[in-house]
Amino acid sequence: WRQADRYGVPRIAFINKMDRIGADFYGSLQSIRTRLGARAIPIQLPIGAEDSFAGYVDLVTKQAIVYTDDLGTTNTESLDIPAGMADLINQHRHDLIEAVADFDDAIMHLYLEEKEPTEAQINAALRKGTVAGILVPVLCGAALRNRGVQPILDAVVDYLPSPADVPAVEGTDPKTGGLLVREHDDAEPFAALAFKIQMDPQGVGKLTFFRVYSGKLRAGSNVLNASNGRKERIGRILRMHAIRREDVDEVFTGDIAAAVGLKFTTTGDTLADENHPIQLESITFPEPVISVAIEPKTKVDQEKLGMALQRLSEEDPTFKVHTDDETGQTIIAGMGELHLEIIIDRLLREFRVDANQGKPQVAYKEAIKKPAHGVGRFIRQSGGKGQFGHAEVNVGPGERGSGIVFEDKITQGRIPREFIPAVEKGVKEALQTGVVGGYPVVDIVVTLVDGSFHAVDSNELAFHIAGSMAVKDAMHKASPYLLEPIMKVDVVMPEEHLGDVMGDLASRRGHILGMEGRGTSQNVRAHVPLAEMFGYATELRSMTSGRATYSMEFSHYAEMPGNLAEAVGRRTTSRT
């Protein structure tokens, strides 16, 4: 939400799961206002809640929509407003008109004269307030049962900005790095961002979803992937309508479509006119925080497993697959226990691959607390030409999220320029396995400050090894420590179980962020280390007799307490 505020992104809100136990539309509405600071204006009110959730009242049209089937598809009825809701509806409609009157003088005059504006006037003013980022229209439904989904799609069109309502998109020239600006205009050179990859279940192949920021694109034309410099040919262009699709010959500025036939494009890549390339701001993805070993239950499925995992990793940039060099095991990594459970389920459901999985492993990282100096000398004489490389580095803590920063401060030709990349490569490879527990090192600045070479015996391999030795030497002196992933946990439970849940979270090294009452329920928010959350669903179910629910998402990395870090380091050492 804060990112959307920072980038000035208008929003609409959808209060989902109205058919679930504990659903509270008005409590959620108040939460949006108090916790997010949004001027939330309901344009729908729910008819019923929990098991009795039947539909909604549209405050703009003053009609009630009741779903008469379990899937919320076509069997809907427009009815008069339920009698028992009349006062509530009148009050919220009055609040809606009062809010939109700030954006339309005609509505303001009608409001002051206590007259009713038209639907078109309300929608136009509501759109103005939403595009300005001041109003947040609120709708409701139960997406799993397809109730309220159609109106939210209409609301996207009715209230959110079109390309003409937002500033021109900025990017960089792939060749010069200079700033480029593209207006949202069909006459501008083509530029689009690929934001999703999907392996089509209907046999079309790989679908690349993209959004056109400028220009237009015809099926069968060629484009440049400005992110990797590869040329791509657009086979077909599909306009997607959920599971239905429509072939189109051409798409224009602001359109969202899917392309068939792209071989080298991944999520976050820029597609551009070959003669007018531009690199748009890419999408950044968090690194996985949990991993498990996986293997098929039968040898027959071995090849199918590899193909299935490759497809899934292409679709989901936060899902990673690699082979452990020491054990030969296939390791999958993702953003949490649930994420990997869904991957395992998809393997069986979509690819018919039944797989065994190992115990989840937390993706720890390492960092340093203080600057240090390290020396690496690699000297080998084995008859004939020898090997010689000497590098010295300074290391220091970097900014949070900066990863590995390498700086070259060599002067007077102490190390020939052609060997500097080898030193950098050696440093970065060495930092993939830290000195505490063998985990990747992050947020570190490595500066190459000195070294020497031999006119005959020095080569790239020698300096690669010397760089690796130097940074390992410095790491031992720099007070290295372990970082562990911290998850943001949200638990909703009946009030009588609050004490048990709070005590359990505290025993898991949780830090309580806040509590909020929702009728007879309590909502607890906390930061808890991922290592403490394995099996939490079962524990919570047992603790609350199945009456609590929770959600969990990655928040940040934080230093692990010393005694626990030592235990993790010992376990890692014993495995190797």
Image (cartoon, grey):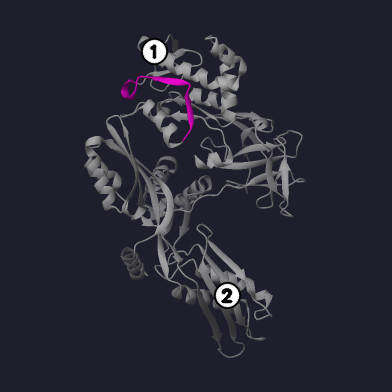
Nearer the observer, 482 or 269: 482
Residue 129: quarter of image: top right
Is-magenta flag for residue 494?
A: no
- What segment carries the magenta color? 37-52
- Residue at the spot 29% in from the left edge and 36% down from the top edge: 522
Res. 354 visible in picture: no
* Whole-percent x, y for residue 19 in the image: 35, 26
The label on residue 87 is 1
Of pointers 2 and 1, the one earlier in the residue sequence = 1
- Position of 545 compared to 126: left or right? left
Q: Amino acid at mark 2?
A: His
Position of 262 relative to 386 (above/below): above
Residue 232: quarter of image: top right
Q: Where is mark 2, residue-wise?
A: 464
State how far apart marks 2 and 1 are (Cα). 76 Å
Residue 163: quarter of image: top right
